[in-house]
Amino acid sequence: MPAQSALTDQTPAHVVIVGAGFGGMETARRLARARVRITLIDRHNYHLFQPLLYQVAIAGLVPSQIAYPIRTIFRHQANLTFRMGEVTAVDFEARFVKMDGSVTAYDYLVLAIGGQTNFFGLTSVEQNAHQLKNVTSAIQARNHLLKMFELASHEADDTQRRALLTFIVVGGGPTGVETAGALAELIRLVIAKDYPDMDLTEARVLLLEAEDHLMGAYPPGLRKATFDLLAKKKVEILLSTKLADFDGVKVTLGDGRQIASHTLIWTAGVRAAGLADLLGVQQAASRRLVVQDTLQLSGHPEVFVLGDAAYLVDAGGQPLPMLATVAQQQARTAAQNIVRMLSGRTPANFHYRDPGLLATIGRNAAVARIAGLSFSGFPAWVIWIFLHIYRLIGFRNRLFVLINWAWDYLLYDNQVRLITRD
Ligand SMILES: Cc1cc2nc3c(=O)[nH]c(=O)nc-3n(C[C@H](O)[C@H](O)[C@H](O)COP(=O)(O)OP(=O)(O)OC[C@H]3O[C@@H](n4cnc5c(N)ncnc54)[C@H](O)[C@@H]3O)c2cc1C
């Protein structure tokens, strides 16, 4: 293997990491002291804290508060070079990645390319819905949401005005629940103050979920708590409801019912990032790349795949969830395995330690399962706030987000109510 011969040659092995999200960044950090040379590649020059993207969409935070320049993060890591660019192919035999017309050879490759929105073939939804997956899509959603209130404020036709003020969120997982709850509060507590002449009781937030419950991964008690907390915030929840079509002005449900609305936010699916389809290796559900227990690609022990892009089942036979915690833990295993291989040892298997579940439903409301204990309401919300502040990168971001949230909480005011584009 080139990696081993590199070791005997006394030149550090070259580790190429594609993706500077949760998994890629953690892998790079864990290899800081290893005798390797790292090239970290990402199509963006920043690491994005995706769990707070919905806050950008509901005008609560600006993108720079949840994103951080990769070069700044690794400023002091001497064995790492960052390259911004899109990897378009991997030659597993010759061991190089292709990017922007050039090739980069590797001894070890870590694919931490994450995921993208899965529309399950619903073309009309893909064309007309908003999604929360990157900075651009979150800003587009914010611009659109705010514009609906501007248009509604001078719309004399009752039917048309109600359609402008009907907001539909699809997907009853944590992102959909968080978005629907926050949107309902934005309308009731903030927008209502900006438009004193408008009757905002006309505004509706609907949450559509295909299953007969919200928050599938959560225990039944917390699913019910989520339902009750959302209902209290006047979110209309439609369970066992499938979406069939959205043409930009009306939603058609699976049973043929139609709802006039100009806004659909799709949070109902994630699949592995597009590069996964171009690699010619085995894919499973959600087009994730099948990996061995050691996170290596079968037949390519020098290639590791982790995070949202990797398909691995847990002890119960269920695919590991697409969560930042999974990606970060897998990153530690992948980094350790590279170090083990460099010293001639066999790679170790990955075991996921579930740290619990936590999702917010808006002001003073969240649901949590931590250390086997399930609870909801204010205590869960406080934990959610401080955990998310802690997990953000950069002291300045932590401070500004905390100040922002305290401001919003005390003054009922979302700071970023700017329409920055048509
Ligand atoms: C709105 C939202 C809310 C979420 N909330 C939570 C939560 O509360 N808790 C939780 O644990 N998880 C949450 N998640 C999931 C979590 O963000 C993902 O599981 C996690 O980001 C996966 O990490 P990753 O390293 O696999 O991929 P990512 O963090 O997505 O990173 C992948 C990186 O690869 C780069 N990339 C992709 N393809 C290429 C290419 N071809 N060339 C170059 N670069 C490429 C991307 O630009 C990206 O930076 C949420 C996700 C979303 C979208």
Image (tube, rainbow, N blue to C red):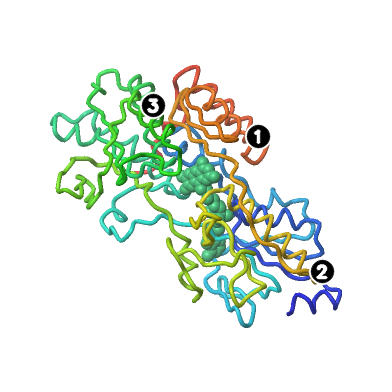
In the rendering, at what x and y percent does residue 267 appear? 38, 46
Amino acid on which the number 3 mark rests in the picture? Leu
Q: Judge from the rendering whether residue 204 lies leftward or rightward of residue 186; answer left or right.
A: left
Image-based side of 208 in relation to 334, left or right? left
Could you tell me which secondary element the residue under label 3 belongs to? helix
- Judge the density around disc 2: few (<14), some (14-19), many (≥20) Cα neighbours within 10 Å: few
Residue visible at 46% across and 25% down in the picture: 365
Q: Position of residue 197 (x, y in %)?
A: 25, 19
CB-based contact (under 8 Å), mark 2 and mark 3 = no
Q: Earlier in the sequence, mark 2 or mark 1?
A: 2
- Element type at marker 1? helix
- Which residue is at the far front? 316
Q: Earlier in the sequence, mark 1 or mark 3?
A: 3
Which three-letter amino acid code belongs to the residue tagged 2?
Answer: Ser
Q: Residues within 10 Å of mark 1 (few under 14, many from 20)?
A: few
Is there a contact, CB below 8 Å, between mark 2 and mark 1?
A: no
Viewer-nearest residue: 68 or 92: 92
Mark closer to the chain start, 2 or 3: 3
Q: Quadrant of residue 393?
A: top right
Q: Residue at x 77, y 54 (%)?
A: 77
In the rendered view, tell whether residue 185 sits above or below residue 6. Answer: above
The image's mark for residue 343 is: 2
Spatial CA distance of label 2 from label 1 is: 40 Å
Of the 4 image quadrants, the one containing the C terminus is top left
Mark 3 CB in 8 Å range of ligand 1?
A: no
Label 1, label 3: how far apart the Cα atoms are: 32 Å
Give the residue number, with chain letter if any, for mark 1: 396
Q: Secondary structure at mark 2?
A: loop
- The one nearer the camera, 34 or 214, is 214
On residue 229, the disc is: 3
Name the quadrant containing residue 154: top left
